[in-house]
Image (tube, rainbow, N blue to C red):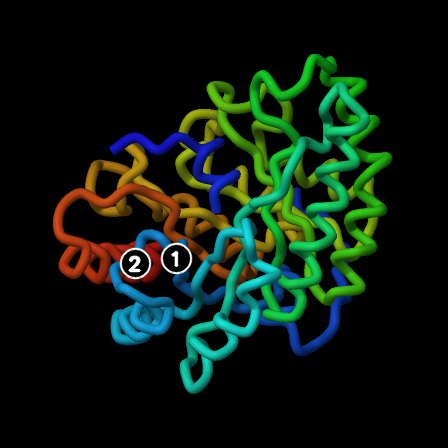
Amino acid sequence: MQIDRRSLLTGGAVAGIGLALRAESAFASPPSPTTKAELHLSSQEWIIPGQTLKEKIARMEKWGFDGIELGGGGLPGRVKEVQEALAGSRVRVSAICAGYAGALISDQESERRKAVESMKEILAAAGELKSTGLIIVPAFNHQTNLDNKTARKILLDLLPEVGEAAAKAGTRVLLEPLNRNEAFFLRQLADAAAIAREANHPGVAMMGDFYHMGIEETSDMGAFISAGPYLYHVHLASRKRNLPGQDERDFTDGFKGLKMIGYRHYCSLECGVLGDRETEIPKSAEFLRKQWAKA
């Protein structure tokens, strides 16, 4: 199963700084080499079978998941629904996946402002739900005509504003590197960490995705080490972008890197599913736990 990343998103060396956000946010303290790493499994909502959000969460709890990743589209109107569905469950909201309008590095100022303002609305809802952060892609291919140097300057000019909105809400914006087939700008974790470091704001961090890393990085372990304390979310997918364990993709090298930086945030499924979800998803979760133990 092939996933169109843009449709999915719109639809729905270790550095040493700490991101000081309010204590009640899930897994709020930043990772560090002195912190014992933990595997907290999450999944995007659409992957889990169930007629209602409450049914999905019940299945996730049964299968040993810790978090659910929600789409940002329409999230402000879903806060009460999500809170009610989570009541009495140990499952919590992990990241919020995009759902905003425009593009931060569009060559059109109107599109940049559209992105900033819509991100602020989602961030407010994300904060209410104590989410790890809002995943953002500065621009997909064909969303901008800017060159890399100009795009980076514009992004760094805008990040303090969205970062401040995130910090006030008790959450973060999470820069996501994609592969070259989906985005020309921001393709490696070290680049995202460098931007977060330069932005130097507690509301600005980044994430990594095993699928994109398999295309752009030479080492999963090295990529996560380069992200260091700026890493606040991880996406999981096989080499063919299906469930982990459904092809030859090995996760131990990447998990070694996560352990080396003391990662304690969520690792979330973003992938297709081959076969029956009721059978294959818990099987994949067990596969990932074994890979973590092996790492």
Considering the image in quadrants, where does the N terminus appear? Answer: top left
> Could you tell me which residue is drawn at 86 percent across and 35 percent down?
157
Within 10 Å of disc 1 (Cα), the crowding (few <14, some 14-19, many 20+) is: many
Residue 8 in percent (x, y) is at: 44, 39
Any part of residue 18 in sight:
no
> Could you tell me which residue is drawn at 52 percent across and 39 percent down?
10
> Could you tell me which residue is drawn at 40 percent across and 54 percent down?
44
In the rendered structure, which amino acid carries the disc numbered 1? Glu
Q: Is residue 233 above or below residue 175?
A: below
Marks 1 & 2, CB-CB < 8 Å contact: yes
Image quadrant in which you'd find residue 225: top right
Residue closest to the eye, 246 or 128: 128
Image quadrant in which you'd find residue 193: top right
**Quick one: SS at disc 1?**
helix
Which of the numbered marks, if any, corresponds to residue 45? 1
In the rendered structure, which amino acid carries the disc numbered 2? Ile
Horizontal side of 176 relative to 69 (left or right) equals right
Q: Is residue 159 above or below residue 88?
A: above
Horizontal side of 84 relative to 227 (left or right) equals left
Considering the image in quadrants, where does the C terminus appear? Answer: bottom left
Q: Is residue 101 above or below residue 30?
A: above
Residue closest to the eye, 74 or 134: 74
Residue closest to the eye, 294 or 103: 103
Residue pointed to by mark 2: 48
Residue 222 in percent (x, y) is at: 52, 38
